[in-house]
Image (cartoon, grey):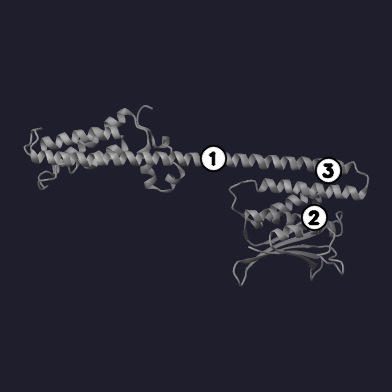
Amino acid sequence: MNGIEAPSQVWVCPTEKSQGILGFVTAMTLAKRSLPYEVGFASCAFGLALYIRFLCDPILPPGFPFLTFFPAVLLTSAFASVRAGTVVAVASGLASRYFFIAPVASFGLSGASAVAMAFYTLVVMTEILLITAIKQTLLRLRASQQRSADLATSRELMFSELQHRVSNNLGTVAALLRLQASQTKDAEAKQVLSMAQVRIATISRLQRRLHSPNIQSVAVADFIRDMAADTIDAAGAGSNVSLQFNLVPVQVVHEKAIPLGLIVSELLMNAVEHSAGRDAESVVITISLSQHPREGGGNLVTLDVNDSGKGVPEGFDIETSKSLGISIARQFATQLSGKLSLFNAPDGGAIARLQFEN
């Protein structure tokens, strides 16, 4: 690369970006520099150090011939190159001996001047070695972070591709079931195939919504709204179903979102099926979500699905119900360590209630 490398050309890892000025200094230290830049930086650093040393000479006590040259060597090694820093170190040592160490205007070494030069050499070598070690460490760290970022990107792509293929396969199975249902003359078998198709289509859509491996928690309110719309659409209930929501913001971990979504789907399909039948002119389903703190710690989440149907038959027992949808919802409620109940609402219709700890 010719010329000075622009800051936009310097690769900055995510941790460097988040560290402000420290990240900027790290990026500038690791940036590759052109030869003209190194020569220019070294010349400016040495010239400025020499100029300031001459300005300070009248006020400095004896014994500080290298005072302004140490920073010049350090900065050049860090922000230009170790090669340029070494050149500045040699030039600074010669200038210090010639101008500021007695006898001045001479490069000869006496006992005292030899000791001073030996001390200077030790210090600048230590500076250069430390800068070299720091640069090597930062380069290894940056390479490690880049490998980690590449692995994370590769993992996310592979995970997304896997989820995409799973969703596509489930969609294909749902389409086959729908085709088989359309060709089946037996009404009961046709209904069973149709419900199986709806469940598989719902799972497929759920997979697409929760496909990211980076999701740590899910906003339940938004998730339920989306899942409810998907379920009604997949069930083919049409415009005769009116959904109403009363949802408070609740966050659940990713692992709980999948069984929760499937429970919502099953309860909705059950509500559509039993709210005076699928062909009812108007079906109103209200979904409510609340969260309250428990005495022993944690929160209790309550999800209600209230339909406008005829309510629960007398003597109904959810534990012994043979409804496939209710059985599936109960199984997923167990995964949440929750409790599922079904009872009549005071103002008519049935309420399916799920409660679990969050």
Q: Where is residue 345 in the image (x, y as percent from the top left)?
A: 79, 68
Q: Which amino acid does label 1 sit on?
A: Leu
**Residue 224 showing in the rendered view:** yes
Which residue shows up at 69% across the image and 55% down it? 224
- 214 to 80, vertically: above or below: below
Check if mark 3's residue and mark 2's residue have beta carbons within 8 Å.
no
SS at circle 1: helix
Q: Name the residue under label 2.
A: 269
Amino acid type at image mark 2: Met
Residue 115: which numbered mark, if any?
A: none
Name the residue nearer the viewer: 355 or 236.
355
Residue in front for this viewpoint, 226 or 251: 251
Residue 151 — which label?
1
Left or right, 38 with respect to 17, comes to left
Residue where numbered disc 3 is placed: 178
- The residues bearing labels 2 and 1 have C-alpha atoms spaced at a distance of 41 Å
Mark in the foreground, 1 or 3: 1
**For the residues marked 1 and 3, what is the alpha-carbon distance in whole angstroms?**
40 Å
103 on left or right of 23: left
Q: Position of residue 316 (x, y in %)?
A: 85, 67
> From the image, which quarter does the N terminus lie in?
top left
